[in-house]
Image: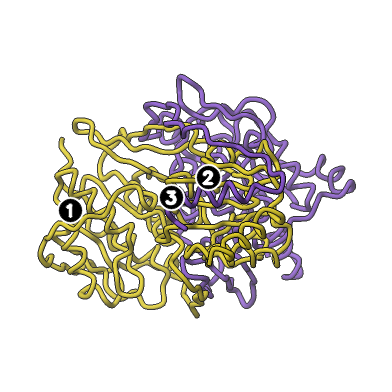
Chain colours: A yellow, B purple
Amino acid sequence: MSIDKVWVLAESAEGNPTSTTLELLSHARSMGATTEAVAWGTDTAAVAGELGNHGATTVYDVGDIGDSLPGAPVAGAIASLVGSGNRPDVILIPASYDGRDIAGRLSVRLDAPVITNVVDLSADGDDLRSQHGLFGGAQVATARFTGERPWIFVVRAKSFAAEPSGGGAPQVVPAPVPELGATDGTKVLARHAEERTGPKLDEAEVVVSGGRGLGAAEHYAMIEELAKLLRGAAGASRAIVDAGWVPYSHQVGQTGKTVKPTVYIACGISGATQHLVGMKGSKNIVAINKDQDAPIFSVADLGIVGDVHKVVPKLIEALKARG
Amino acid sequence: MNVVVCVKQIPDPAAPQALDPQTHTLVREGKLIMDDSDAYGVEMGLQLAEAAGGGEVTLVSMAPAGETSGLRTALAMGAAKAILVSDDALKGSDALSTAKVLAKAIERAQPDLVIAATESTDGYTGTTPVQVAELLGLPSVTFAKKVSVGDGRVHVERQTEAGYDEVDCPLPAVVTVTAGVVEPRYPSFKGIMAAKSKPVDQLTVADLGLDAGQVGAAGSRQEVTDVSAAEERKAGEIVVDEGDGYEHVVRFLEQLKLI
């Protein structure tokens, strides 16, 4: 049985589909399948054009979910569509905070397992093989589903390239939310966006990140200064985000952003698996750390074994001197 | 208030990790320890039960061979008791089967709140807690960085791509916590001694009323077909800083035409 129909969970931010959504649509199209999207919110009409331009021929519109977190209502709406006999072979879901919630709930509703942390997906006859980094990316596991379809894959950002198909406006079909009961009890009371300046972390050509080796929250200022001098973005390891030194929106890694800049400069970061999976795809990696056995050096193109408090200020001075 | 905290017992992540060459599953031999990510949930549970002025923390875990070493750590922190599901039939369970087992075990404790880590350190599938919530028909909030309970509701600051959301839901509910949520206490000597005699209720798949064919390798509908070494990055240049380390970085950036 070939892969004929693929659904992509289409997330939006600020009125546009997220880049991972467009990457998944492009990849679904490249598998030769009929590509359809599932969107929610009040601006589906506005994002439908861009979804169509990346290959979606139909957009199922869950509609306004009010203040609810998307997990329960969106999973419920998708399960209803499937229950009505509209069965895709594959459902691709972005590995985001809400994407993971939707995948978990949908998995139970369809009694279908999920495969998460996918970084590549390719057809093998009528089968699909997914790839996953293991042990910080030192090994690659290949996995597949052995049961009934639909198969649910949760895919990491930047696993595929987003390419417009030139496709026209898709048809928009309502996908109503069924009665959810207690599962829809979670409501958002207020949203807080953390201000950042300069390029976005996941789009910047240069990313400078700091970790626990900085020693104290106030030393993060030099990471921001270095990033600014290189017209890049400042990132962070989970350790210092969890310690409250910098906001979550700076986090690079498994539970944070996936970045693939031209150069990634890791300062005082040891290189835990959690961090490596988020930045290992960078084209060039520079690591500054005083522990020469730190795992970060195993992925570094240039490693400086030294104290970040000495190396980084000198680097900043040298860059300033160049003007 | 009664809190269930899900605790995963895993091979020490600091020790070398390996996959079984036949089954491609993580080798779980030898002593297991409590997943460090779960220490935050245990601490959060203890603090919330304390703040509510009563109730206790019950641990729920699924582990091979009656393993309790990791549970003892959490009991030493202050949890009152534990439910451990251990059964040879569970070997090779996928996340959904695991969620089915945990949900059945959690039901027995009739909690007001279920706490889990956002993801485990060894498998990091990251979907199990939400699967548990859906199986139990409960609301959930994932990625909590701040949690409080009052008036039969849980109030959470939830991490988002842009910052955080203030989120609220009625109890009972499932909440997953990040490592930033609270600072876990170290078990005291007294706590460690007390933990040795705290009750651990050990259950099998049959005790939970689950069909052995639904769980473990038999119930798993996904498989790892191959594991191979990743394409290695070309070995980089490593320089020991003797005051001129920064110059190497400058030259590197010049070559990339970034400066």
Residue A78: assigned label: none
In this view, the residue farthest toward the top is B22
Q: CA distance from mark 1 to mark 3?
A: 39 Å
Q: At 59% across and 42% down in the image, what residue appears? A: A303
Find the residue positioned furthest to the right.
Answer: B190
Q: Residues within 10 Å of mark 2 (few under 14, many from 20)?
A: many
Q: CA distance from mark 2 to mark 3?
A: 22 Å
* Amino acid beneath label 3: Leu
A102 and B51: which is toward the camera: A102
- Please give left or right for residue A38 compared with residue B217 in the image: left
Q: Secondary structure at mark 2?
A: helix
**To which quarter of the image does residue A42 belong?**
bottom left
Q: Residue furthest bottom?
A: A190
Label 1 environment density (alpha carbons within 10 Å; few <14, some 14–19, many ≥20) = many
Height in image: B22 above or below A68?
above
Q: How many marks?
A: 3
Quadrant where the N terminus of chain B sits is: bottom right
Secondary structure state at the residue bearing disc 1: strand
Percent across and percent down for residue A274 are 55, 47
Residue sitting at 36 percent across and 51 percent down?
A: A158
The reply, left or right, for residue B52 in relation to residue A34 is right
Residue depicted at x 33% and y 41%: A120
Chain ID for label 2? A
Q: Identify the residue under disc 3.
A: B256
Give the residue type that dot 2 points to: Leu
Residue A182 lies, in percent from the top left, at 44, 67
Q: Position of residue B211 (x, y in %)?
A: 44, 35
